[in-house]
Amino acid sequence: MRRKLMLLLLVLAVLFVLVGCPGSSIDELISKMKFLDYAFADGEPETPAVALYLGRVKADDVLQVYTPVPEPKSGEFVDNSIVIVPTIGAPGYLYYLDLDPGAFYNHPGRVVVLGEDGEPIIDEEVQGWPVLNGETPEPLVSPTMKAYAKAIFWRNIRYKIAEIHIPEWVVFQRVISGAVVVNGLIPTQNLYYEASQIHNMMYNAMVDFMGVDRVRQVEYPDNAPSDVEDAIQYLVETKKVNRLTLYFIAHGANDYMNIGGYGFGASTLKNIIESYPRVSFSVIIESCHAGSWIEGTVDITDASNVVIAIATTSSAKSAYPDWDSATGYTNDYNGTTDVYVEWTSDFLEKMAYYTSAAHWGEVTTLASAEGIPDESAMYDLCFQSIKGGSPPGTSYTFTERVGIQDPQIYRSY
């Protein structure tokens, strides 16, 4: 009785195709009816099952079955988990009867190819899924895809595959760190050489720490504000970075930097950061009056996803290239090793210190205690070890000891 009902429904489907879907194939519908008669000649499966139509095949198509864990032979697994089923040899229609729909493999199924005359060309009981010309048919990529549901033309009525909706933000919860390293200077500007050299050093340090594919270098001639935004977007949307470090070296004034000859304000950066609410940001700004970005009228730290922000000087003071001596002061503690830009060079030395095997535990201890990313904890420790105590005369940064530079830090924790 049920078979007759199914045939009636398929006949009605044919009429629907004739009237409303002129692009569909009547031959395919007829083949589906023949498949049901052939596959269920001995009765329908008692357990949950679905029949999927995977499309037409040609005589020279290569049909295989991929079995993730092949059956062992003589106590050892076979080397290749691709098992070739007989050559198709004639045009026809490919079907897959999934006998445990929605489950991980291995699980039982049946691969059938019916010829254009309705006779079976291939009929194999399998533990994997069919692969046509080296590719998994789209409906079999995932049972939660619409293509899978669309390919089903028969199902055990006692079974329904749940449609799963995964919110986009849940998909990428694995921690992925990245960095955008920005040199805002152009060749005609003062200190371009020093800024370019320290920018390259910071880029290389971030690559060593995070990997080259998750660090973007923004520099002349492609260093307009739009290039900064593009670099951030690329890492977040393409590389799925969810913990992002931003380093800037630039000429600056209060709430303002010159990036590639263009103005770039604190409000602009704040808006960019807030547009990625599920990304944790660590920001380091090496510019004159950098402190205004974290203690000014419009602060980037107003964005709730800024974990830590470091300004290499206060809103009232300047930042400097490498200084090693000044009248009336003991020479720079690391004058023989720091180069190009005073504070950032010192910071890079401390990064090397804390990323070493001997001291990385200090980073993870702080990160765990405060519930912050490892890199944010490392930047905090680097800042503390440079800043020194009070008075400023104890600072590792020579220009701070002299009293002309005043690094600042913001912590959300």
Image (cartoon, rainbow, N blue to C red):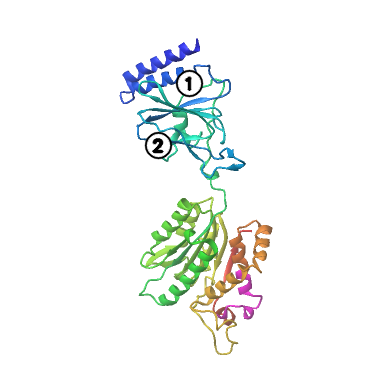
Q: Assess whether residue 394 is covered by the magenta stretch.
A: yes
User: Relative to residue 360, is residue 149 drawn left or right?
Assistant: left
> Residue tagged by mark 2?
62
Say left or right for 372 vs 210.
right
Look at the picture and state if 226 lies above or below 174.
below
Q: Which residue is drawn at 40% across and 33% down?
A: 87
x 51%, y 54%: residue: 241
Distance (Cα) linking label 1 and label 2: 22 Å
Asked if residue 337 lies in the magenta stretch, the reply is no
Work out whether residue 114 or residue 286 is closer to the camera in this orientation and state it: 114
> Which is more toward the observer, 76 or 367?
76
Residue 299 is at least partly visible in this image? no
Quadrant showing the C terminus:
bottom right
Position in image of residue 404 (x %, y %)? 54, 79
Vertical relation: 260 (above or below) 67: below
Residue at 59 percent of width and 62 percent of height: 376
The stretch of residues the image draws in magenta is 382-398
Residue farthest along the left direction in this orientation:
22
Quick one: which residue is furthest to the bottom in this view? 327
